[in-house]
Amino acid sequence: MNEEAHMDCRTKLVQYLTEEGVNFDVREHQETFTAQRVAAAEHIEGWSFAKVVMVLVDGDLQMLVLPAPERVDLDVVALALGARDVRLATEEQFAARFGDCELGAMPPFGNLYGIRVVADTTLAGRERIVFEAGSHTTSIAMSWADYVRLVRPAIVDFGGVATIAAS
């Protein structure tokens, strides 16, 4: 366990995916700082790129995972999760939890950091997803099915493009 404390995010992810028997690809690309730009650098559709948004749900740090082009509607998230208060987490509130990652390049594996993961339903239709692997120059591609098997996210419709039917 002591070794893991000094392991960088990419190494930890690669080791974890390998131990779990997952078929994945590590990809290097030019340095990018937005999910949409990573998708472009990877030559993939933004809807297959899983970005991470950190939020506080009734004061509890949680990880939202959604496609790059989608925006989070915090009111929809609160409704979907049955929460009273959902707000974006500040860097100060989550940076220390991801000490092995570059800020803003956390992978959608909150389970490796003791953080609940909630994924948007629009990712569930994807065969494969791509996500940042702890740096702004590295990403990993793997199947959605393997991702769900390992992370066991709650899957909720919370994206900004979602609509709520009137009852």
Image (cartoon, rainbow, N blue to C red):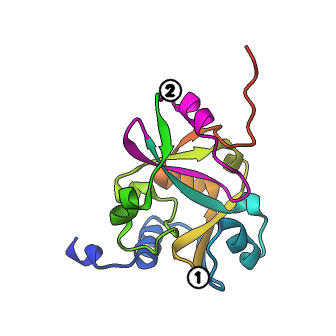
Residue 62 numbered tag: none
Residue 82, numbered label: 2
Q: Amino acid at mark 2?
A: Gly
* Residue at position x 43%, y 61% in the image: 91
Determine the image quadrant of residue 162.
top right
Looking at the image, residue 37 lies above or below residue 166: below
Tell me the distance, in whole angstroms, between the alpha carbons under discs 2 and 1: 36 Å
Indicate yes or no whether the magenta region holds residue 42: no
Viewer-nearest residue: 166 or 125 = 166
Residue at screen point 61% across, 74% down: 33
Q: Measuring from the top left, give residue 95's x and y in whole percent.
A: 38, 64
Residue 137's disc number: 1
Which quadrant would residue 166 be assigned to in this image? top right
Residue count near mark 1 (Cα–Cα under 10 Å), binned few <14, some 14–19, many ≥20 = some
Residue 4 to residue 81: above or below = below
Q: Secondary structure at mark 1?
A: loop
In the image, is residue 127 above or below residue 102?
above
Query: Does 73 sit left or right of 11 as displayed?
Result: right
Start-end of magenta stretch: 57-83
Q: Position of residue 118 (x, y in %)?
A: 52, 44
**Residue at position x 65%, y 37% in the image:** 157
In this view, 49 is above or below 152: below
x then y, percent, for residue 38: 68, 73
Helix, strand or loop at label 2? It is loop
Q: What amino acid is labelled 1 in the image?
A: Thr
The answer to whether 141 appears left or right of 11 in the picture is right
Quarter containing the C terminus: top right
State left or right for residue 74 relative to residue 14: right
